[in-house]
Amino acid sequence: MKVVVIGGTGLIGSKLLAKLNEHGHEAVPAAPNTGVNTLTGEGPAEVLTGASVVVDVSNSPSFEDDASS
């Protein structure tokens, strides 16, 4: 089964990808450094083709000025 992992190159995503691959799935990372940018909409159509499951473990950005407080 093809599983797309949004945030698949990060700390949690990379571990999830390894486990999915161990269990015989086709795990595909979707992240800016793999050509997928969920904020701009670049790349998702290509990576999602043929996917049965999408898992989002990305770090949600905040655009608020006081978000770091």
Image (cartoon, rainbow, N blue to C red):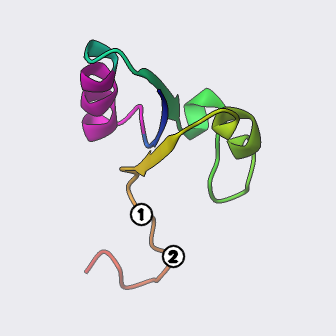
Q: Position of residue 42 (x, y in %)?
A: 75, 46
Q: Amino acid at mark 2?
A: Phe
Q: SS for tag 2?
A: loop
Res. 3 mark = none
The span picked out in magenta is 8-20
- Magenta span has 11? yes
Q: Quadrant of residue 21?
A: top left
Q: Quick check: 17 above or below 37?
A: above
| Secondary structure found at label 1 | loop
The numbered dot on residue 60 is 1
Residue 62 appears in which quarter of the rendering? bottom left
In magenta segment, residue 31: no
Label 2 sits on residue: 63
Q: Nearer the viewer, residue 31 or 26?
A: 26
Q: Is residue 3 left or right of residue 69?
A: right
Residue 54: where, in percent of width, then height?
48, 46
